[in-house]
Amino acid sequence: MPKLTLSFISAFNERVQPLMDGAIQPEGLEFIPTYSHPAETFWRQLKFQEFDISEMSLSSYLIARSRGSDMVALPVFPSRRLFHTELAVHADSGVKQPGDLAGKRLGVAEYQQTAALWTRGILEHDFGVSQYKVDWYMERSEELSHGGATGFTPPPGISFHRIPADKSLASMLVNHELDAAAVAGPWTRAPNVMDRSSRIPGSGGDWSKVKPLFPDRMAEAARFVKMHGFVPVNHAYIIRGDIYRKHPWVAFNLYTAFVKAKALAQEKLLERIPSALFFNREYLAMTREIFGDDPFPYGLKANRPMLETLTAYSLEQGLTPKKMKAEELFAESTLDL
């Protein structure tokens, strides 16, 4: 019997790569893979539904599903970060600790994105900074925003501004037109190539005045995980609704393949850590000490506390009109996994 051929779009991710390159073969399925940056992927899928299977922003997925979009998710979460620890502040802002952000100007790439959803929720619930007491600035243009694709607008009462096209999060932060922003620095990950902030080599300001809000990110990570018991999820994978209805078996077979792909990535993890990181084994041990042996658990059973928090934040922040339930969001054959 011939395999069902499906289009599949995703960013590079070592936990998903074995599916993209064919090292793991889902039963009954064959993929036509496309590599794409998440910002582009989500916009294309939300606006045009181009692909049969797609990586998807969880926040945008909640919004789209609450508005009737025809797609269903798998409880596969290969992308997680502690987004609030990536905030940078200007030295002249007066912000010394997270609680000082109340009344300040804070920039994010996109207001509705999962990173911003988690950042607002954690600032409010862990540090007492109300979303209504911050002036929010959004960098991504309306034309290319996920909110533009879903029809989302910030709820009433939110102080919301768009960053001018000739400026960026980075330029406004370094020139103290923002007090804080989610921008990459030497203390975090590499710059996001899809954001205007990372494409500007310099912005005329004094970068020495830009500091991380959390100087010890690992200490904050340990605090958060100890308090909440999970690492915030960023993305999942969705199946387009017409494919799911016509071939419901795809969901379980695909989930099983994702699990196998992650297991293969974990098996080869140590040998794939760059040799230039001389203390790779020690760093891996520190990571496991904070996050456990598997920081990327799949399935609903392992992720219900995280999903309960995420959907509660989405409702609280006015992104969705109700608290979405797992039964509304995930393929039926995966609900007991």
Image (tube, rainbow, N blue to C red):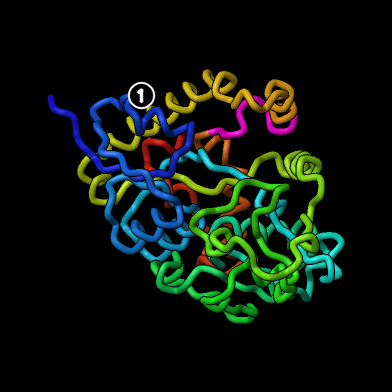
Quarter of the view holding residue 253:
top left
Residue beneath the point at 86% across and 70% down: 94
- Looking at the picture, does residue 309 appear above or below residue 336? below
Residue beneath the point at 53% across and 64% down: 196
Is residue 93 one of those drawn in magenta? no
Give the prevailing secondary structure in the magenta stretch.
Answer: loop
Estimate the x, y position of residue 330 in percent, counting from the top left.
Answer: 42, 45
- Residue 279, can we see it? yes
Which of these two is toward me, 68 or 203? 203
Q: Does dot 1 land on a helix, a strand or a loop?
A: loop
Estimate the x, y position of residue 151 in percent, counting from the top left.
Answer: 41, 72
Region in magenta: 289-297
Which of these two is toward me, 18 or 46? 18
The number of discs equals: 1
Is residue 293 one of those drawn in magenta? yes
Estimate the x, y position of residue 123 in percent, counting from the top left.
Answer: 73, 60
Residue beneath the point at 39% across and 33% down: 255
Which of these two is toward me, 120 or 197? 197
Horizontal arrangement in the rendering, residue 64 relative to residue 234 (left or right): left
**Amino acid tagged 1:** Ile
- What is the quadrant of the N terminus in the image? top left
Mark 1 neighbour class, 10 Å CA radius: few under 14, some 14 to 19, many 20 or more: some
Kindly identify which residue carries mark 1.
24
Residue beneath the point at 52% across and 64% down: 322
- Residue 134, can we see it? no
- Looking at the picture, does residue 41 appear above or below residue 66? above
Horizontal arrangement in the rendering, residue 106 relative to residue 214 (left or right): left
Estimate the x, y position of residue 20 in percent, counting from the top left.
Answer: 35, 33
Quarter of the view holding residue 155:
bottom right
- Looking at the picture, does residue 190 appear above or below residue 48? above
